[in-house]
């Protein structure tokens, strides 16, 4: 980052950003990519462009786009979310099909797109299988729907599914992925898709205030994310499993071992609130995120090693005196 060659990315001449965008497009197998400050902005731009005002997008009930992006799908894109429930982020195919509206446009907002999330944050970082994605993509094609992926953690999904990331990406018209999560960059996400789509996206990014000047300093870290950090995610997955296995027998909590497939461990608390639990583990410098009053998420990443996992296991066991 210190040595990054910079220009002015709003004028399109920052060489480090150009390199990052080329790399991102190439690794996803798409024509072009756009560097955006956040995943939220990447998703918002895609929905604003592909769905637009007064049109519907099909989203999973617990999707990040619907729940955790400050309502941007409506607030900024002006689109109507058609929220469908699922088990583990996989909406039944027939439910998707029966919720696509194409006729009676003067009454019913027309369905313009579908978005999936892979891995799925709320459902514990489970990877969405490729054969399911393929089926949804066929429905999207038949109905001329834009197919977007909130792929904040698409590389975790590809690692867990043991496929090249392109094998997931190829089914989608647009993909947002984050550099700033498991890929360890301090800032930034990428939106990828066809050249024309990304050219339009650049305009939306600008009017949302996401055009940044000498941002090669930040993009330099994103290059390391793509070239290096994508290749070490299996280590995080092994450590998450180790953490889960180290606490699964504690009777005051529930951990679904088979759902620990990537870098998340979700802990369901039976006897304590999330806030009380988090307060206790914080004393030992162990941090996690509350999802609700009884559900807590632990995440493994580049800065967590085996000793840290042992500390977390010991700390959680001590809370329940196990
Ligand atoms: C699945 C998913 N999508 C999108 C985002 C948004 O990313 P950002 O925090 O960079 O806006 C997140 C952030 O946690 C996420 O988990």
Image (tube, rainbow, N blue to C red):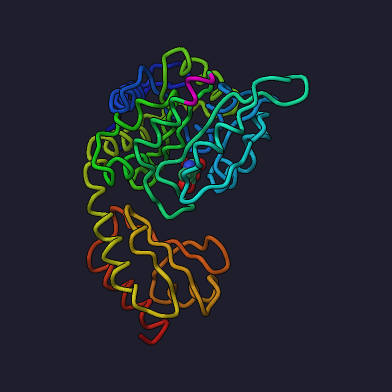
Point 25% across, 37% down: residue: 163
Question: Is residue 184 or residue 135 the one in the foreground?
Answer: 135
Residue 208 location in percent, x, y?
59, 28
Along the horizontal axis of the image, is 297 left or right of 229? right
Residue drawn at x 77%, y 19% as measured from the top left: 106
Q: Residue at x 68, y 29 (%)?
A: 78
The answer to whether residue 292 is magenta is: no
Q: Position of residue 128 (x, y in %)?
A: 39, 43
Residue 94, given in percent of the width and then of the height, sits at 53, 36
Q: Quadrant of the N terminus?
A: top left
Hey, which quadrant is residue 95 in on the image?
Answer: top right
Position of 88 relative to 321 (above/below): above
User: As displayed, is residue 319 above or below residue 1?
Assistant: below
Give the x, y percent position of residue 267.
43, 67
Viewer-side residue, 129 vs 41: 129
Q: How many marks?
A: 0
Residue sitting at the far top:
196
In the figure, residue 74 lies in which quadrant?
top right
The answer to whether 129 appears left or right of 11 in the picture is left
The front one of 295 and 192 is 295
Name the quadrant containing residue 149.
top left
Measuring 23% from the left and 42% from the top, which residue is drawn there?
162
- Image quadrant occupied by the C terminus: bottom left
Q: What secondary structure characterizes most of the magenta part?
A: helix
Magenta segment: 139-143
The correct choice, above or below, for 139 with respect to 244 in the image is: above
Quick one: which residue is furthest to the bottom in this view? 321
């Amino acid at each position: 980052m210190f040595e990054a060659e910079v220009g002015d990315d709003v004028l399109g001449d920052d060489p480090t950003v150009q390199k990052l965008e080329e790399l991102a497009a190439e690794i996803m197998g798409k024509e072009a990519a756009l560097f955006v400050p956040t995943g939220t902005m990447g998703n918002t731009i895609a929905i604003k462009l592909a769905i637009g005002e007064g049109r519907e997008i099909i989203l999973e009930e617990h999707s990040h786009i619907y729940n955790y992006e400050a309502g941007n799908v409506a607030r900024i894109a002006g689109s109507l979310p058609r929220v469908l429930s699922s088990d583990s982020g996989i909406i039944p195919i027939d439910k998707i099909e029966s919720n696509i509206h194409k006729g009676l446009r003067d009454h019913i907002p027309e369905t313009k797109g579908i978005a999936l999330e892979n891995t799925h944050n709320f459902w514990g970082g489970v990877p969405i299988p490729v054969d399911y994605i393929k089926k949804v993509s066929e429905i999207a094609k038949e109905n001329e729907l834009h197919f977007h992926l909130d792929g904040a953690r698409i590389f975790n999904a590809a690692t867990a599914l043991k496929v090249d990331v392109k094998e997931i990406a190829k089914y989608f018209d647009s993909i947002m992925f984050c550099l700033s999560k498991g890929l360890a960059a301090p800032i930034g996400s990428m939106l990828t898709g066809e050249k024309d789509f990304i050219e339009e996206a650049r305009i939306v990014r600008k009017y949302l205030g996401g055009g940044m000047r000498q941002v090669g300093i930040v993009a330099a870290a994103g290059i390391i994310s793509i070239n290096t950090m994508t290749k070490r995610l299996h280590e995080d997955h092994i450590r998450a499993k180790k953490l889960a296995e180290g606490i699964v027998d504690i009777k005051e909590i529930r951990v679904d071992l088979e759902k620990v497939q990537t870098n998340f461990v979700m802990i369901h608390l039976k006897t304590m609130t999330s806030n009380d639990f988090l307060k206790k583990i914080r004393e030992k410098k162990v941090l996690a995120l509350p999802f609700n009053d009884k559900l807590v998420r632990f995440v493994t990443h580049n800065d967590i090693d085996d000793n840290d996992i042992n500390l977390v296991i010991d700390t959680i066991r001590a809370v329940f005196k196990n």
